[in-house]
Amino acid sequence: MKFERSIELPVSAETAFAWHERPGAFIRLRPPWQQTHLLAHKGGIKRGACVSIETKLGPLEQRWEIEHGEFEQGRLFTDRLLEGPFKSWQHRHVFEPISEKLSTLHDRLEIEAPLGAIGRLGEPFLRDLLSRVFAYRHRLTLEDLMRGQAWGKAITNGTVLIAGITGTIGQALAGYLQTRGYRVAGLSRSGKSPWPGLDMYDWDPAEGRVAQDLPNDVAVVINLAGESIIGRWTTEKRRRIIESRTRPIEVLSAFMKDRGIEPDLWINASGVGYYGPRGESVFGEESPLGSGFLAEVCRDWEAAAMTNDVAKRTIAGRFGVVMSAAGGALKQMLPAFNVGAGGPLGNKAAYMPWITLLDLVYALEHCMQHPEISGPVNFTAPGAVTQAGFARALGKAVKRPAFLPTPAAPLKLVFGDMATETLLIDQQVEPSVLKQTGFRWSFPEIEDALKFELGRL
């Protein structure tokens, strides 16, 4: 079986090739709807380099051992399967120059299925899967390279430190910043890296402990740490949600102050829950605090971040619902929608503030690029969507009907206040700061965003 896909890129062949050589490239190109883990990666993409990955489909796990072969700097690299689910698998990545600022990337695969004629029966399914994979990969490559072209080189030689790096947002952000040329380090309780080539340090905010070998050149802190808000909000769950957001800020800022580390920027995650579960108006960054538990959490979270006394500039990022098939709300919804059992949650006319993971990552670097940005920033898409509009767009993306609503009453019965303040939220949130500073969304509308996330472009 042969499979080919090409895309024209607005950069030179050398620039596109260099992007693929950087440590975060594999993570960036991972399809979000597939569970893929990079286990080992030695030698980059040069001849003789080896890659070990693990893929998971339901309960089935499959290890792939891959070796890079033919290599021509700036023009070509290849890889072939040594061990894995196929009898053979060879992939040629060819970068063809068109001009000094234009090139074409050609992906060419030759695959031999196992079990002979029986294995070949799965060819239509494999072609469809590869079409989705490369639709996603090529669009992401194009968007990343366009950002790099617009923004130029990394704005700092110092380390970008990400707390909460093992989560969906943290991994996407770290991989992106690595391909942009930033030096990235992560904090996690285990200190274990989610992939090779990423510097990791251990910490335990509950015990007030931070690794003593943390770099002294931290220029940017991006704090994404915090207990998941999903689940019934018992008294103990509420305590963990609050403390897991305020305590890490206190511990890390105290550690940096003691060490004399003065980052230029501290970006702290927060949420649109700050405005409360009310839908009577459009909320901008200057809108007042709402009511409810999440509003109180965001208030305390932002207060802890904004009063840190180590960073020269601090941003409180009020995230909308982050759309990614790799995790969060979209991943939880997909099983029902894939079988035609999806639909609006609660009031179909209620507005849901959202943003793609891709645009969230870009918006975070946008804030790094613009020193005039500080204080609260709404990280949402400009295209508002209702529950009915979202269900319709997701159903279209997975090619299934999406008209089965979930009434509010059972959600409130099961999840209590969490349902009211998250699943049934009704908010129109305006990303005023991002608009005013010239940020460009790759996916401002929900239909295109969901098609991209699922490789259905």
Image: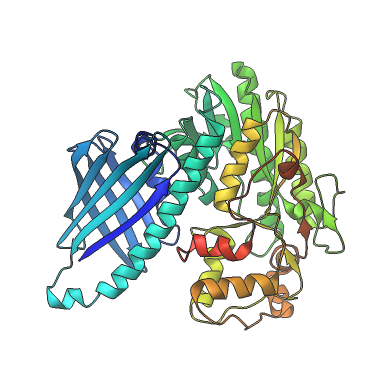
- Residue 184 lies, in percent from the top left, at 48, 32
- Residue 343 lies, in percent from the top left, at 62, 78
90 left or right, relative to 251: left
One can see residue 377 in this view? no
Residue drawn where x is 57% and y is 71% of the image: 394
- Residue 20 lies, in percent from the top left, at 35, 40
Residue 156 picture quarter: top right
Q: Which quadrant is home to the N terminus?
A: bottom left
Q: Nearer the viewer, residue 58 or 149?
A: 149
| Residue ranking furthest to the front | 99
Q: Nearer the viewer, residue 446 or 26?
A: 446
One can see residue 97 in this view? yes
Residue drawn where x is 22% and y is 47% of the image: 79
- Residue 260 lies, in percent from the top left, at 61, 16
331 left or right, relative to 100: right
Residue drawn where x is 56% and y is 33% of the image: 151
Q: Nearer the viewer, residue 274 or 349?
A: 349
* Total count of labels: 0
Residue drawn where x is 62% and y is 74% of the image: 391
Colour pattern of the rendering: rainbow
Q: Is residue 98 above or below residue 355?
A: above
Q: Is residue 383 above or below residue 365?
A: below
| Residue ranking furthest to the left | 116
